[in-house]
Amino acid sequence: MITYLIIDDEYIAHDIIKGYCDLLPNMQLKKSCYDGLEAFEYLNKNDVDLIFLDLNMPKLKGFDFLKTLKKPPKVIVTTAYKEFALKGYELNISDYLLKPFGFERFLKAINKTFSSTKSHISNLSQTNTISKRIFLKNNKKYTQVEINNILFIEASGNYTKVVTKNETITIREKLSSVLELLPKEDFLQVHKSFAVAPKYIKSIEGNRIFIKNIFIPIGKLYKRNVVQLLK
């Protein structure tokens, strides 16, 4: 379960963010705060995995509030002010959403935030599990996938197949776009149409990689990647 806090002085912003989160599995709202002081008081006694943070708020501005936290959870900034983006990344935020933002952009921010292997979540027993999940869109359905269960990824025309231990999910995305959501150290592109999880490689024979009973070709331009893997 990914627990989150919304900090924004606009009621409509709370409704939009909660509405988007309700479309995703395992997202739990812990509290809606309308200024930084209210959020600071809550976080002194409680932990959350993620904060949706507005910047232009009364009493305490968003970044000023963030600087008061000794061990902040992951933070996605939601604001109408693009000029503060650089400062946000200097404060180690996960993503910067410019209002108004749609669900697709929101989903990308969630995937970016929780597909990273580096986590700033403290005192959370489920950290490793939470940080290894992404959401994949197939038509109007959003499927949560454990990154550790992905065997390989295959480009197929205008689509990409994400092959896991239990199922194959086909999404309308480029292979390169899917790889951007995944930890670079956990996947290796071995062909223009294939990327694999090295830990699931059963054997390598000539220009072929075997994962379970499936063989995956090694492209000439990507052979160096495989050679580096064998060193």
Image (cartoon, rainbow, N blue to C red):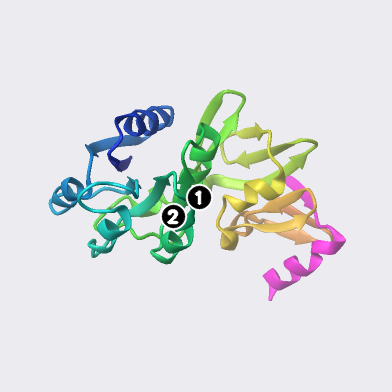
Q: Quadrant of residue 31?
A: top left
Question: Residue 214 or 29: which is nearer the viewer?
Answer: 29
217 in the magenta segment: yes
Would residue 101 be found to the left or right of residue 187 on screen? left
Q: Secondary structure at mark 2?
A: loop
Q: Looking at the picture, does residue 211 appear above or below residue 157?
A: below
- In the image, residue 26 sits, relative to residue 178, either above or below, namely above
- Residue 77 located left or right of residue 191: left
**Pick the front one: 136 or 4:** 4
Asked if residue 212 shows in the view, the reply is no
Amino acid type, residue under disc 1 in the picture:
Lys
User: Which residue corresponds to mark 1?
Assistant: 112
Residue 75: image location, x then y, percent: 37, 52
Can you identify the residue that label 2 sits on? 94
For the N terminus, the quadrant is top left
The residues colored magenta run 213-231
